[in-house]
Image (spheres, rainbow, N blue to C red):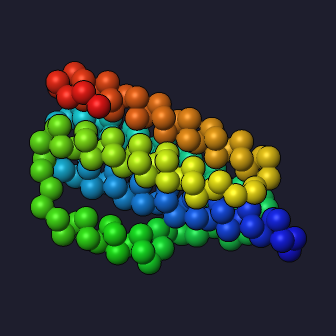
């Protein structure tokens, strides 16, 4: 396998691990909320995040690689730690956690993960996914403003 293709596959798999962490995060947020409207919004966001993860996995296969199937050991440890923490079911707290997860981890860290040299098609795919993430962040910010929190 060409060195550049292998590097792209490795970068995409790192990105995919982060996507799986985000999906788990959404699952935890959905379980915490008792507000039906918020639950529906988070489920919709999770669904769109799953579609993005599927696109990345498919791109890895197109390149001849094997996509990862989870968040990795460090990701699983982080998810386990989050489950142990006592989390509030308050709407503001859930929205804040969703905002931090999407903005800090979903966009900024994901962008850094794939900042290396990847092919144009893969870069375009990642950019599209990160644009969708930004739209979710904007919706979360809007919802936070509705409950009186300015971010």
Where's residue 128, x and y in %?
Answer: 63, 38
Q: Is residue 41 visible?
A: yes
Q: Nearer the viewer, residue 80 or 7?
A: 7
Name the residue furthest top: 146
**Vertical comparison of 12 with 26: above or below:** below
Q: Which residue is found at the position 57% from the left and 49% from the top?
A: 111
Asked if residue 61 can be seen in this view, the reply is no
For the point 58% across and 64% down, the residue is 14
Residue 85 location in percent, x, y?
17, 65
Q: As drawn, which residue projects farthest toward the right?
A: 2
Outermost residue on the bottom side: it is: 73
Task: Locate residue 122, reporting x and y percent.
Answer: 73, 50
Relative horizontal placement of residue 110, taking residue 119 as reference (left or right) = left
Q: Residue at position x 75%, y 55% from top? A: 118
Q: Nearer the viewer, residue 58 or 10?
A: 10
Q: Is residue 113 left or right of residue 90?
A: right
Query: Which quadrant, please, contains the N terminus?
Result: bottom right
Q: Quadrant of residue 92?
A: top left
**Image quarter (top left, top right, bottom left or bottom right) of the C terminus:** top left
Which quarter of the picture shows residue 81? bottom left
Q: Position of residue 63 (x, y in %)?
A: 79, 62
User: What is the tally of numbered marks visible in this picture?
Assistant: 0
Q: Residue at x 56, y 41 (%)?
A: 130
Q: Viewed as shown, does residue 8 lie left or right of 68? A: right
């Amino acid at each position: 396998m060409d060195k550049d293709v292998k590097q792209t596959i490795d970068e995409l798999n790192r990105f995919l691990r982060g996507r799986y962490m985000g999906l788990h995060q959404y699952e935890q947020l959905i379980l915490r909320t008792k507000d039906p409207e918020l639950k529906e919004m988070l489920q919709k966001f999770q669904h769109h995040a799953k579609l993005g993860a599927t696109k990345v996995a498919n791109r890895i296969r197109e390149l001849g690689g094997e996509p990862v199937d989870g968040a990795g050991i460090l990701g699983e440890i982080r998810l386990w730690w989050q489950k142990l923490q006592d989390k509030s079911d308050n709407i503001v707290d859930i929205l804040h956690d969703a905002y931090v997860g999407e903005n800090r981890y979903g966009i900024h860290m994901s962008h850094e993960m794939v900042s290396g040299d990847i092919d144009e098609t893969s870069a375009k795919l990642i950019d599209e996914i990160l644009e969708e993430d930004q739209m979710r962040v904007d919706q979360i910010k809007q919802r936070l403003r509705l409950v009186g929190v300015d971010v």
